[in-house]
């Protein structure tokens, strides 16, 4: 899984340093809304809501904000959100997969299409890029206060398919169909993940010169800033040179 840990590390650091904390909370609240509409307001009996609550805690969302979000989502007057995806290419042939939650599909389509056009990309047909990405469960486990070797063995016992380590975290990958079992395995072992998500991991990445890579990241960042967008995935290799140039 060369490069995947780098991807997750970048995403985690970006989240930790992101001044737009309200944007992070907004995404989580949308996840909560969809989860409650689908399965009710009790996390114990609603696996999707339980996951959203876990990610809210990992993002340090205040408890009262979390409870208000669940209560509001349970209100019959709250608008339902539709899950929409887009697939396309950034400049220089980099594949981009966009996941959205929206209460107005026409607005979202127009906005995402406009961003692709403005920043040198183009939208494709849904399904055209699915072969480039594989959906996997991705768990971020903080190492602090634990013995790394013992923790790694616990993660393997819990059902980890692959594990990568940096100074602060284990990044654990599972097959999509094993995501729920991994959650249960972590709970049984008393291990709380800082985040747990189904992500679209690129099967292969593409390395570009820094100048070209920055143009791709400009489009990625602009799409991520759209209020209807939940996640953006791409297959650009995040080299050290590109990371340093973006900073």
Image (cartoon, rainbow, N blue to C red):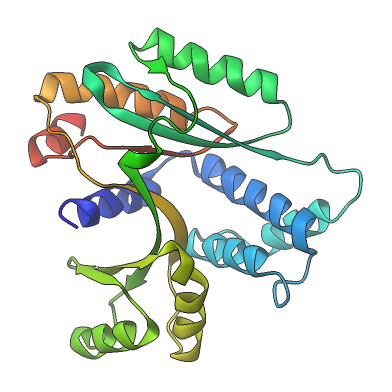
Residue 241 visible (yes or no): yes
Determine whether 188 is above or below 165 in the image: below
The picture quadrant where one finds residue 64 is bottom right
Q: Nearer the viewer, residue 62 or 111?
A: 111
154 relative to 212, above or below: below
Q: Quadrant location of the N terminus?
A: bottom left
Q: Position of residue 23 (x, y in %)?
A: 54, 39
Q: Residue at x 43, y 67 (%)?
A: 194
Count the marks: 0
Q: Position of residue 178 (x, y in %)?
A: 45, 71
Residue 146 visible, this orientation: no
Residue 52 position within the rendered picture, expressed as x and y whole percent measured from the top left: 60, 61
- Taking the image as shown, residue 2 lies to the left or right of residue 230, namely left
The answer to whether residue 226 is above or below residue 113 is: below
Residue 36 vertical position relative to residue 179 in the rendered view, above or below:
above
Question: Residue at horizontal 50%, vertical 44%?
Answer: 21
- Name which residue lies at 43% across and 72% down: 193
- Residue beneath the point at 24% across and 22% down: 93
Q: Of all residues shown, which one is farthest toward the right?
A: 76
Apparent side of residue 82 relative to residue 10 in the rendered image (left or right)? right
Q: Quadrant of residue 247?
A: top left
The picture places residue 51, in percent across and down from the top left corner, at 58, 65
Is residue 136 shown left or right of residue 211?
right
């Amino acid at each position: 899984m060369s490069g995947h840990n780098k991807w997750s590390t970048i995403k985690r650091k970006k989240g930790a340093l992101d001044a737009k904390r309200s944007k992070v909370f907004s995404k989580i609240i949308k996840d909560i809304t969809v989860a409650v509409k689908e399965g009710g307001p009790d996390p114990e009996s609603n696996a999707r809501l339980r996951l959203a609550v876990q990610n809210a805690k990992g993002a340090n969302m205040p408890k009262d904000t979390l409870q208000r979000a669940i209560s509001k989502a349970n209100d019959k007057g709250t608008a339902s959100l539709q899950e929409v995806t887009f697939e396309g290419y950034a400049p220089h042939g980099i594949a981009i997969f966009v996941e959205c939650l929206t209460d107005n599909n026409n607005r979202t389509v127009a906005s995402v299409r406009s961003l692709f056009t403005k920043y040198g990309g183009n939208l494709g047909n849904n399904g055209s890029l699915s072969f480039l990405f594989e959906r996997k469960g991705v768990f971020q486990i903080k190492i602090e206060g634990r013995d790394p070797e013992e923790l790694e063995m616990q993660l393997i016992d819990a059902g980890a398919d692959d594990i990568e380590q940096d100074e602060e975290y284990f990044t654990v990958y599972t097959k999509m169909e094993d995501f729920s079992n991994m959650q249960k395995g972590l709970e049984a072992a008393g291990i709380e993940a800082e985040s747990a998500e189904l992500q679209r991991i690129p099967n292969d990445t593409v390395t570009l010169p820094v100048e070209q890579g920055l143009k791709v990241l400009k489009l990625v960042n602009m799409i991520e800033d759209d209020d209807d967008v939940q996640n953006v995935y791409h297959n650009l290799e995040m080299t050290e040179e590109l990371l340093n140039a973006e900073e």
